[in-house]
Image (cartoon, grey):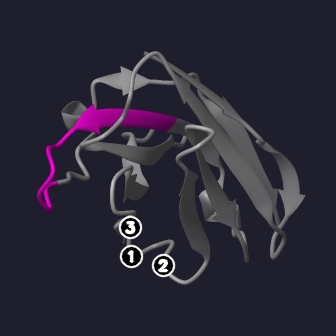
Amino acid sequence: VQLQASGGGLVQAGGSLRLSCAASGRTFSGYVMGWFRQAPGKEREFVAAIRWSGGNTYYADSVKGRFTISRDNAKNEVTLQMNSLKPEDTAAYYCATGYFGFGAGWSAKPASYYYWGQGTLVTVSS
């Protein structure tokens, strides 16, 4: 499995960025795709997740109402639309995927995700 993240950059506070994660190497039925971020000196934290099958979405409280995760099953691609960005959103953003079955299972814990893409840096200036 390979995950390729892209779309990071420098933006002013209040601006928007769109991150993409292209996945390949298998079919992803029963998998959940998550976005995580890690700021310097801090632990990696959950941002948002989406089930490949069914499209259920999950968000960290800190990004609810500002970020939107979506997927394109035909392209095996997940995007994270980030609006109203704040300086505290500055971090390296990582996409990751793991198998959770076909029920409602998912997790906000990084350790629950098997495969990781490389980080893409998001910098929000004040």
Determine whether the residue tagged by mark 3 lies in a helix, strand or loop: strand
The residue beneath circle 3 is 57
Q: Amino acid at mark 1?
A: Asp
- Residue 44 seen anywhere in this rendered image of the structure: yes
Spatial CA distance of label 3 from label 1 is 13 Å
**Residue drawn at point x = 36 percent, y = 35 percent:** 28
- Residue 40 seen anywhere in this rendered image of the structure: no
**Residue drawn at point x = 61 percent, y = 78 percent:** 66
The residue beneath circle 1 is 61
Task: Tell me the quarter of the picture where residue 113 sits.
Answer: top left
Determine whether 91 is above or below 4 in the image: below
**Residue drawn at point x = 38 percent, y = 67 percent:** 57
Q: Amino acid at mark 3?
A: Thr
96 sits left or right of 21 in the view: left
Q: Amino acid at mark 2?
A: Lys
**Residue drawn at point x = 42 percent, y = 41 percent:** 42
Label 3: few (<14), some (14–19) or many (≥20) C-alpha neighbours in 10 Å: some
State the mark number for residue 64.
2
101 sits left or right of 43 in the view: left
Q: Are marks 2 and 1 in contact (CB under 8 Å)?
A: yes
Spatial CA distance of label 2 from label 3 is 11 Å
| Closest to the observer, 115 or 90 | 115
Determine whether the residue tagged by mark 1 lies in a helix, strand or loop: loop
Task: Tell me the quarter of the picture where residue 1 sits.
Answer: top left
Q: Quadrant of the C terminus?
A: bottom right
39 sits left or right of 124 in the view: left
Magenta residues, start to end: 95-105
